[in-house]
């Protein structure tokens, strides 16, 4: 963990205040003055300010049902950050483990545990993320098996050197097109990576267009009965899913 982050987790100081404290020479790590905010410290290090030893608070883990027109960012931009919905102290010290676009809804995991979030988002961990996808064009019954196979084998996305990792595609329903914003196919897609706009680009690669996108599940964690805009702390069992 970065030294400035450790100080923030051990005190009421903001990140900027912690950096000022470091520059002043008041912080020591294992008895030595430390001024580098990016210095990596560990649980077995002794960190003091003016001789008082610091003890970091435990990490925090939350699930949020993201609403449309909110962004997975630590700052408000055109749309508000999802961290505005988390009513806890120092919410903006948290980060999002696996971002969603502003127009995408659904499950978002939020934490201040960098190792834990790495296990969620790293392609090497092959954590499954399942999306409900509404498509502009109908999927023909005769073409469905071949389409499923293409997703399983991996797709070539524009601007990418390698194929996407194997993905699982399941058609849920067909619908009549009512207007430009309506859909004609509803599918579930499970992927194990998170390239930029990946789901939208995957369907574009097969000649379709996503008109609605909702993340339902990450690994063994689901939204359950969490309503749009609501959040809760993760259970110990849910946290343990990505603790290794």
Image (tube, helix red, strand yellow):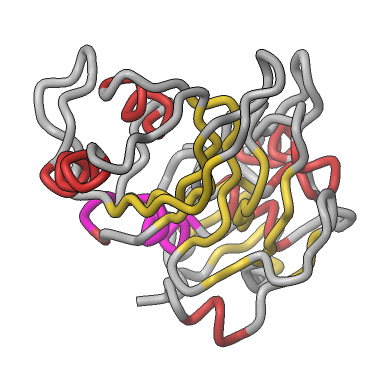
Nearer-the-camera pick, 87 or 47? 87
Q: Quadrant of residue 88?
A: bottom right
Instruction: Report if residue 181 is visible in the image.
Output: yes
Is residue 137 magenta-colored? no
Q: In the rendered image of this protein, does residue 155 appear above or below residue 230? A: above
Q: Residue at x 46, y 24 (%)?
A: 137
Q: Is residue 123 left or right of residue 8?
A: left
Magenta segment boundaries in residue numbering: 114-124
Q: In the rendered image of this protein, does residue 96 appear above or below residue 161? A: below
Q: Quadrant of residue 50?
A: bottom right
Q: Residue at x 65, y 73 (%)?
A: 58
Q: Residue at x 66, y 25 (%)?
A: 182
**Residue 178, image x, y percentages:** 70, 22
**Residue 21, image x, y percentages:** 69, 40
**Residue 93, image x, y percentages:** 70, 46
Q: In the rendered image of this protein, does residue 154 appear above or below residue 109? A: above
Q: Residue at x 69, y 52 (%)?
A: 8
Q: Is residue 75 left or right of residue 193?
A: right
- Total number of numbered labels? 0
Nearer-the-camera pick, 83 or 210? 210
Q: Could you tell me which quadrant the C terminus lies in?
A: bottom left
């Amino acid at each position: 963990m970065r030294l400035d982050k450790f100080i923030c987790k051990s005190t009421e100081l903001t990140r900027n205040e912690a950096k000022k404290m470091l520059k002043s020479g008041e912080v020591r790590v294992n008895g030595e003055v430390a001024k580098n905010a990016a210095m990596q410290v560990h649980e077995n290090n002794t960190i003091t300010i003016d001789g008082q030893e610091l003890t970091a608070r435990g990490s925090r883990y939350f699930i949020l049902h993201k609403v449309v027109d909110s962004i997975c960012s630590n700052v408000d931009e055109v749309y508000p950050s999802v961290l505005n919905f988390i009513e806890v102290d120092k919410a903006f010290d948290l980060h999002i483990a696996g971002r969603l676009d502003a127009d995408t809804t659904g499950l978002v995991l939020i934490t201040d545990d960098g190792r834990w979030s790495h296990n969620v988002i790293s392609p090497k961990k092959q954590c499954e993320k399942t999306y409900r996808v509404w498509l502009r064009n109908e999927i023909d019954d005769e073409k469905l098996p071949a389409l499923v196979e293409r997703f399983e084998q991996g797709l070539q996305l524009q601007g990418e050197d390698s194929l996407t990792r194997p993905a699982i595609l399941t058609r849920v329903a067909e619908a009549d097109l009512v207007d430009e914003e309506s859909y004609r196919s509803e599918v579930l897609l499970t992927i194990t990576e998170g390239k930029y706009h990946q789901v939208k680009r995957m369907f574009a690669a097969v000649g379709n267009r996503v008109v609605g996108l909702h993340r339902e599940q990450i690994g063994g964690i689901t939204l359950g009965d969490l309503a749009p805009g609501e959040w809760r702390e993760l259970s110990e069992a849910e946290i343990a899913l990505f603790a290794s």
